[in-house]
Structure formats: structure tokens, C-alpha cells
Amino acid sequence: MDASGAVALAPPRPVRRGAGTVYFELLVTVGLFAIPAIVGSARAFVNPVALQTPGHPAWGQGNFLIVEVLIVCLLAHVVRMNGETITVFTRPVRASDLAWVCALLVAHWLVYQIVTRGLYVVVPGLFATGEHLRRPSFITGQISPLFVAMLLVNPFCEELAMRGLLQTRLTQLDWSPALVVATSATVQAAYHRYQGIPAALAIEGVFLVFASFYQTTRRLWPVVATHLIWDVLLILMYPR
């Protein structure tokens, strides 16, 4: 039991399948989500025009939503086929998670501010060119039911894949905690590169906080909630 008297979640047990099988599982689950996103992000970084979805923003929003819903379904199916449940990946929700969400929101803001302000001092030219203001057109479009659905699904998809499945599997494969955290945060930040260098580096710092928290506590839901709240706040602040 932990200090609160709750039953502690044991570290993930080593998988009984071969390492090759586990890596292939990650390739067709996490990789299916992350690799196309990384390629698309790199393309948009080199050519910002690629951020503009042809036609109405709803096309981009609908595509984004469909992909992420399918990824969540795929993750759930793979976990079920392995005879696992969500308890393998996270402790259950409890009241104290609210305090963790507040702490993660503060940490998120502090890390983002420290990195962006540090870059502004060291490389102010990145900000003079508008490098830090890149956003896809389907994100800056008008808020609609489709937009809200996309916003709600995204934190679950990202955190279930990049925190829950990826970090758990790499831990089961006996990767060191530091390497698990670094890998998870770096892969996740890679598909945010379209936002420009300042934002991508700041976001990687935030993801390092998320990954470290999850690796240490095995609590996924506070990270999902923090990701969701922060996304909502940022979306509301985007010019429209």
C-alpha cells in the first residue's frame, strides 16, 4: 500500500512474448500513429504552406478525429488480445489525482515559459520570423462540434499511446527509466515540430515532465486531464 492506504500498482511485469514481437506491436500501434505524424510534421516544418488544409477546416478536423478514434480502438483491441486490462497501464482514478493535475499544470506552464524565454534570449531571431506562431488551419478554424470532438479525443489518443503503451512496453523490455522517458518525450515532440523550433523544444520539455511523472507514479489519468485542459486553454487563446 502507498501512504494513502491505497493498493500500489506494481511495476510492469516482463512480457512473456519475444522482444521482436513486442517491438512489432509497438510499430503497428504507436508507430502507426506517430510515424505518419512525424513525416507530416517534418514536411510542414520545411514548407509551412502544408499546414493549410485545402477547403473547409472541417475536412482536416474530420480526418484528424477519425484517425485518432481508430488508433484508440486499435490500442484497446491489442491490449484485449494480449489478455490485459487498463490496470496494467495505470492506477485507478482517485480524488488525489486532482492535486496531481494542478501540479502538472503548474509544471507545464513553468517549463514552457522557461524554455521559450530562454530561447528568446539566446536566439531572438526565431521569434522575429513568426516561427513560434505556426498552427494548422484545421486547429485555428471556427469552433464546432467536430472541433470539440477532436479536442476531446486527442489527449486520450496521445497519452494512451505515448505514455501508457509505449512506456509500459519499453519498461517491460528492461529499458532504463531514463531512456524510456527520453524516448517517449522525444517521439511525441517530433510530431509537433510543425509548430516551429521554439514551440517544439518547449513542448518536448513538457513531455519530459509528463513522461517522468507517469514513469514514477504509473498514473495516466492526471496526465490525460492535464493535456486536455492545456489544449483547451491554448485553443481558446488562438486567434480566429
Image (cartoon, rainbow, N blue to C red):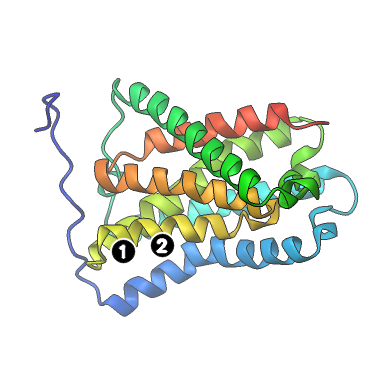
Label 2 vs 1, first from the N-terminus:
1
> Would you say 209 lies left or right of 17 here?
right
Few, some or many C-alpha atoms within 10 Å of disc 1 (few <14, some 14-19, many ≥20)?
many
Few, some or many C-alpha atoms within 10 Å of disc 2 (few <14, some 14-19, many ≥20)?
some
> Would you say 156 lies left or right of 68 here?
left
Is residue 137 positioned above or below 144 on the image? Answer: below
| Residue type indicated by callout 1 | Leu
Tag 2 secondary structure = helix
Which quarter of the figure is the N terminus placed in?
top left
Is residue 79 positioned above or below 144 on the image? Answer: below
- Pinpoint residue 149: horizontal percent, then vertical percent: 64, 35
Q: Say if mark 2 contacts mark 1, CB within 8 Å.
A: yes
Q: Residue at 60% of width from left, 39% of height from top?
A: 117
| Residue type indicated by callout 2 | Thr
- Pinpoint residue 209: horizontal percent, then vertical percent: 40, 43
Disc 2 versus disc 1: distance between alpha carbons? 9 Å
- Pinpoint residue 81: horizontal percent, then vertical percent: 34, 61
Residue lying at the far right of the rendered structure: 55
- Pinpoint residue 93: horizontal percent, then vertical percent: 31, 29
Q: Residue at 27% of width from left, 58% of height from top?
A: 177
> Would you say 200 lies left or right of 106 here?
right
Q: Quadrant of residue 84?
A: bottom left
Is residue 181 positioned above or below 222 on the image? Answer: below
Q: Residue at 83% of width from left, 31% of height from top?
A: 240
Tag 1 secondary structure = helix
- Residue of label 1: 170
**How many marks are shown on the rendered structure?**
2
- Residue of label 2: 183
Q: Residue at 83% of width from left, 53% of height from top?
A: 53
